[in-house]
Image (cartoon, rainbow, N blue to C red):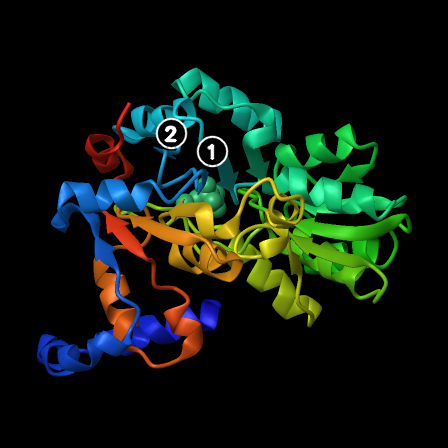
Amino acid sequence: MLSVVTNLLRRSVFTSTATLGRKASAMHLEKQTKELLKLPAQEVKDWLSNFDAILTDCDGVLWLYSDVIEGSIEVVNKFIHSGRKVYFITNNSTKTREEFLSKAQQMGFCVDTDKIISTAHLAANYLKRMEFNKTVYIIGSSGIKKELDAVGISSFGVGPDTLNGGLKNLVDNELKRNLNSEVGAVIVGFDEHFSFPKLAKATSYLNNAECLFLATNTDERFPMTSCVIPGTGSIVRSVETAAERPALVMGKPNTACCKHLIDDKIIVPERTLMIGDRCNTDILLGTNCGFQTLLVGTGVHKMEDVQKWQKSGTAEEKKLIPDAYLPRLGDLLQFIDS
Ligand SMILES: O=C(O)COP(=O)(O)O
Ligand SMILES: [Mg+2]
């Protein structure tokens, strides 16, 4: 997926506005994105009445780090109070599900634990379900460790690990002599202390073909305009490259993260709306699950990105196109009857 987006971005550099105009006549063949604010209010209300379940991304839709995005609490709570099932589904692995719950509740969202889907929790439960009984080496944050503790799986690796005695020391004293023979899985999530020793240790463990390789998510970067904060995807790519094998990704767009809701008939795909700010995780998950999708412009992708993808020919690129677009989630408030 990274390569798809990279290619899309590369291609977009050479796309002129004139080309956009010329191809407009062929656009009726493409999936169209409804810009909700440009539609009559009744049409938007009718569209919303199709949904009795909503899955919403968190960072970039509901909040940006610790700041609530204006209007999102009111919209989400109205959805909840109208009897719709609302799930918070985040790729962020730095917190436990309980920590996300208290973050959301402290902000004012009326959400319960069973409605939070988060990737550290998904990873721990994946290992628990397979009755994993070895140790996990973590590249990531305390959220992963705490979720593993909660299911009785031992782990280590969280925190700084720097190249103190040089490369020779790392190789001779750590990689050759000090690898933990109990490690049976490596989990890679967001790690602000990611380092060369961590990369070398993870890939040394993964050199054993029986060692499981899980990644929480593949988001390339965090939603930020003033600078770039690399996301988990950049760390996962690095480990995958050195390990020479792909990780099993727990979060969006892997449909496994919400499959149980469909299998257990808790939600009906045709009556479910996926709301997100990133198309190659949130919107792709929605498309892959048969949900309707709504992109909001408060995070990673914008309507201009969608317009570029609408012109591209591949089926994979078309899966990134949402059904609807809004500048921000709070704009929905005027269309939800209380
Ligand atoms: O933290 C991330 O990488 C993404 O988080 P999100 O899925 O809530 O946008
Ligand atoms: Mg997001």
Residue 158 lies, with reference to residue 181, above or below; the image says above
- Residue 94 visible in the shown view: no
Three-letter amino acid code at the position of disc 1: Val
| The C terminus, quarter of image | top left
Q: Tag 1, which secondary structure?
A: strand
Residue drawn at the location 45% of the way across and 60% of the way down:
287
Residue 22 falls left or right of residue 36: left
Secondary structure type for disc 2: helix
Q: In this view, does 124 lie above or below 293?
A: above
- Neighbours of disc 1 within 10 Å: few (<14), some (14-19), many (20+): many
| Label of residue 254 in the image | none
> Which residue is rendered at x = 85% and y = 59% of the image?
176
Mark 1, residue position: 86
Residue 105 in the image: state x and y as whole percent.
47, 19
Q: Name the residue under label 2.
A: 79
Between 165 and 318, the residue placed more toward the observer is 318
